[in-house]
Amino acid sequence: MAPLATPPVVKDHRALRFLTAGSVDDGKSTLIGRLLYDSRAILADQLDTLEKKAAGAPIDLSLLTDGLEAEREQGITIDVAYRYFATKQRKFIIADAPGHEQYTRNMVTAAAGSDAAVVLVDITKLDVNALPLPLLPQTRRHALLAHLLRVPNIVFAVNKLDAVADPAQAFHAVRNALLAFADQAGITVAGIIPVSALRGDNVTQPLDADWYNGPSLLQLLESLPPAQERKDGDLLIPVQYVARDGEGTGNQPRTLFGRVAHGRVKAGDAVQIFPSGHSAVVAEVRLAGEVVDVVEAGQSAGVVLDRQLDVSRGDWIATPQTIHPVQRFSATLAWLDTEPAQVGRKYWVRHGNRWVQARITSIESRLDIHTLDAIDAHQLAVNEIGHVIIETQQALPVESYADNRVGGSLIIVDPTSNRTSGALLVKAAQ
Amino acid sequence: MNAPLTVEQLLPELDHTHLDWLEEEAIFILRETVAAFERPALLFSGGKDSCVVLRLAEKAFKNKGADGQYKGRLPFPLLHVDTGHNFPEVIEFRDQRVAEMGERLVVGHLEDSIKRGTIRLSHPLESRNGHQTVALLEAIEEHRFDVLMGGARRDEEKARAKERIFSHRDSFGQWQPKEQRPELWTLFNTRIKPGEHMRAFPISNWTELDVWLYIARENIPLPGLYFAHQRQVIRRKGLLVPLTEVTPLEAGESVETAEVRFRTVGDMTCTCPVESPALTATDIVAETLKVTISERGATRMDDRTSDASMERRKKEGYF
């Protein structure tokens, strides 16, 4: 059985960005409303509006997260919305992925770059006396998608505890079913938390019950580590922007800016530029306008080299002999465009800071979104995910997405509409 | 009198390294904008959010000297849309900062658009906030800017909560909420067609509290009206309306002098102060921690009209 990770003490106070996944009526909007309300991120004038709507009844917290007028007219949320709250411990960013149509597209958008996923499980929709207890397809789908996108912490919030007769028995039955499913899917679970978003039980305030002595949802979120790229080992920096120091033209020192993808950089390091292959030694590193000793993965470095080299946006700075560019690679493709993926058509892809032309040379299979099993298929439509082979016009230093999110992720852009049509997660060079 | 509060005393357990993370993200977005576009401009009104973005731009593009000042010049001009109804002290502050920093400032005047006839006011003292859109789009066209960087934040208002970091505008400058591009990782899709432009929001993920914490930490200069001062005001519909030539006394009202500060500084006809004794950014952090009314709700007369008023203005091309 997959072990439950014990919450470590977090010393890193970067904001924790988490996505919330749930289907209609799972109580997701109420849960987010509850987190905002209890952490006092809702302000008096916003409450005013809600109280007017409630007309004396208890206020509906779910209304806090509904956003655009276009959506209110339709009564659904159609786009990822970002919400903010802070506790004394930490700042939080919620990427709220709506659960209706466009679901995969929204969830992929919310999950890319999230540190955690909170998957809502509506306990009232489950037969808690069945053995084995069948989970709802959407629970499996949400967890599998988060896992596929390598969201580092996956949390299940078992909601509507207030609406079941024997919450202790029901929660334990659901917990066992979730653990069995996670174990089978290879998902490491960061926590399974019983909550009642409606009543506020165990969301921000610990549950007062003899059958549960774990953390509240908020306590767990406060303890989760943010996603980090590795700081040790070889260096990789995608060059984002090249600046000349001073005015005018000629041979001035140039600063190469880029966020370190992995490793660290300091003066004296030998580096190699991709694709030119030229070598140099780092003369100086800067961080936010100041000269510093070292800049690490996740920070944007300004690198000055000891010699004049022709370096542009889209190039890479790396430890010598560590870049292995390829023109063909296999990848998982999440298709986001209403126009289906077209094998053989030229698209733009962005890898790091470089735009190149590329083709999907073949679609090998499509994933069953409920099981992640590969199904024989040669087409991908909107909200579908599949395995593909990509060929690019220039060789790119792609890495496996599992090893490094920066080197392993690309977007596909339609050259006619400029829409962001797909997200690619690199599996391996071909 | 008690010793002044420090930020550490106010939030002892939060160690503010989250500000480093927000700063890193903002600098990354600013450099991305300058690298990916041909003709960028930074919106600078003298307001607190744009002052924060200006400091972030110095960190992104300049080098800090031994005297603590940032050397060099930003790789883009600053742009301000002047409604003609701005607080004079804010305009003075704007010009002084631009001169001190040696930057270029482009001003789009609403008066010019009125003279051209592209803006028609229904009455002379009408709020000019909504009309900024026209003057802004005219400035974009005249200077052929292809991206504008601005200090909008997602926590300001519901419609902003779904705004992208790079937000596409069609050739009429319009925002299409249903046509937004998914934003994945930091692989921003900055591709546009001729005549279109983008807005880039480097402090999207900051809250009002983060902004004040950062102003306090970095000692960012702000116009004086952000801090407590004596001002003649009129109490009107639960708001404190500053007495100005464009917001005169109405029948049955009286003027009083109050100790106030502004939380936002927009057009004089629709920006109200709140009562406050806060003299420093740290005092304001303390107040912000206790505050129970959101920034736009307390201070903007125009946003009160409807729950959806911001979304409508955004669709029309407002910032």
Image: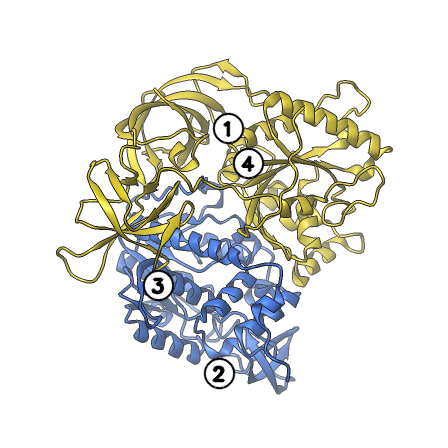
Chain colours: A yellow, B blue
**What's the distance in space between the residues labelled 1 and 4, CA to CA?**
22 Å
Write the residue at 42% across / 34% down: A404
Residue type at tag 1: Asn
Q: Going 62% across and 47% down the picture, which residue do you hit?
A: A9
Whether labels 1 and 4 belong to a single chain: the reply is: yes
Marks 3 and 1: in contact by CB < 8 Å?
Answer: no
From this viewpoint, is residue B201 visible? no
Check the picture and name the quadrant holding the C terminus of chain B.
Answer: bottom left
> Residue B58: which disc?
3
Which mark is on residue B245? 2
Camera-near label (1 vs 3) is 3
Of circles 2 and 1, the one toward us is 1
Q: Amino acid at mark 3?
A: Glu
Determine the CA span between mark 2 and mark 1: 56 Å
Q: Nearer the viewer, mark 1 or mark 4?
A: 4
**Residue mark closest to the camera, 4 vs 3:** 4
Q: Which subunit holds the residue at mark 1?
A: A
User: Can you tell which quarter of the image residue A138 is in?
Assistant: top right
